[in-house]
Image (cartoon, rainbow, N blue to C red):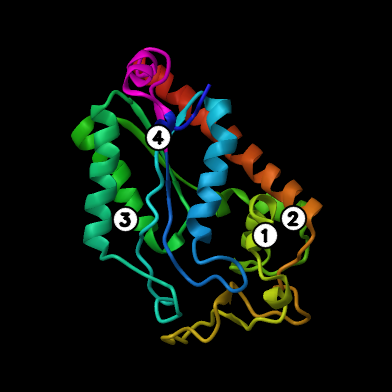
């Protein structure tokens, strides 16, 4: 049975929503420079997570929203942005339309940290204005234990070890392997604000011995991706349980 709205006929949709499925999963990303991984990384990852999680939750995957709010890496070729107000309005209306179509629960899988505040506002509005149960999920918030297990001692960051691993696990052919470790990396530093940012791999702290360089080990990447899926799934099952109590 398909888990994607785009693949359903209207009759098939009517038969399933909301009678046997009231959960819509909405992947959201942006188009932004990511070192040696694709400009669409922030959409590729939540789409892959949606595909892994939808069968576990008996959810239906909505089409992804690929245009988001890009800031510090916008000057890099290929990066795009929409305004914060446009993004908030469009994401809310797209999700609200799913509620109007019959879904009572909305899970937004956000792949881009630069729009976390806007997504949080959308989640709040979905309850306040539509009385829909909504939640935003950002995969990196669930990666700490997976990183400690699979990539101990590494330095985290944008387009670095973890994000490269997530793409390597689901779309290895899209990675520029020759550039992955050679491409420039730079760490965030207190008191420093640069535009354009001097590297498209942005580390959370300075590295001493290449601890922030992407690791192109496919089995490790698959293990990492699967652990992140498990962490998200465990947390969301608690969310769903709490919602069931509220609805009973």
- Going by the image, does 124 lie left or right of 203? left
Residue highlighted by disc 1: 173
Q: Quadrant of the C terminus?
A: top left
Residue highlighted by disc 3: 118
Occupied quadrant, residue 53: top right
Marks 1 and 4: CB-CB under 8 Å? no
Residue closest to the eye, 20 or 14: 14
Start and end of the magenta stretch? 8-25
Looking at the rendered structure, which numbered label has been put on residue 148?
2
Looking at the rendered structure, which numbered label has been put on residue 6?
4
Q: Residue at x 22, y 36 (%)?
A: 128
Residue closest to the eye, 54 or 104: 54
Cα distance, mark 4 to mark 3?
26 Å
Residue 72 drawn above or below residue 55: below
Occupied quadrant, residue 209: bottom right
Cα distance, mark 1 to mark 4?
25 Å
Nearer the viewer's eye, disc 1 or disc 3? 1
């Amino acid at each position: 049975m398909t888990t994607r709205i785009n693949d359903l006929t209207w009759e098939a949709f009517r038969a399933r929503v909301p009678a046997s499925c009231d959960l819509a999963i909405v992947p959201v990303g942006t188009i932004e420079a990511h070192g040696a991984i694709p400009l669409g990384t922030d959409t590729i990852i939540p789409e892959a997570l949606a595909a892994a999680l939808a069968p576990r939750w008996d959810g239906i995957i909505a089409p992804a929203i690929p245009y988001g709010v890009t800031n510090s890496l916008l000057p890099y070729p290929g990066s795009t942005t929409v305004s914060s107000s446009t993004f908030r309005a469009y994401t809310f209306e797209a999700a609200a339309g799913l509620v109007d179509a019959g879904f009572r629960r909305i899970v937004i899988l956000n792949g881009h940290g630069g729009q976390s505040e806007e997504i949080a506002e959308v989640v709040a509005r979905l309850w306040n204005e539509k009385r829909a149960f909504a939640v935003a999920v950002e995969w990196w918030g669930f990666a700490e234990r997976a990183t400690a297990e699979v990539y101990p001692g590494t330095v985290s960051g944008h387009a670095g070890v973890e994000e490269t691993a997530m793409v390597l696990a689901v779309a290895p052919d899209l990675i520029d392997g020759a550039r992955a470790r050679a491409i420039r990396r730079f760490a965030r530093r207190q008191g420093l604000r640069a535009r354009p940012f001097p590297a498209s791999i942005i580390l959370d702290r300075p590295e001493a011995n290449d601890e922030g360089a992407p690791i192109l080990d496919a089995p490790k990447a698959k293990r990492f991706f699967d652990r992140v899926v498990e962490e998200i799934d465990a947390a969301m099952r608690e969310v769903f349980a709490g919602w069931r109590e509220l609805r009973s």
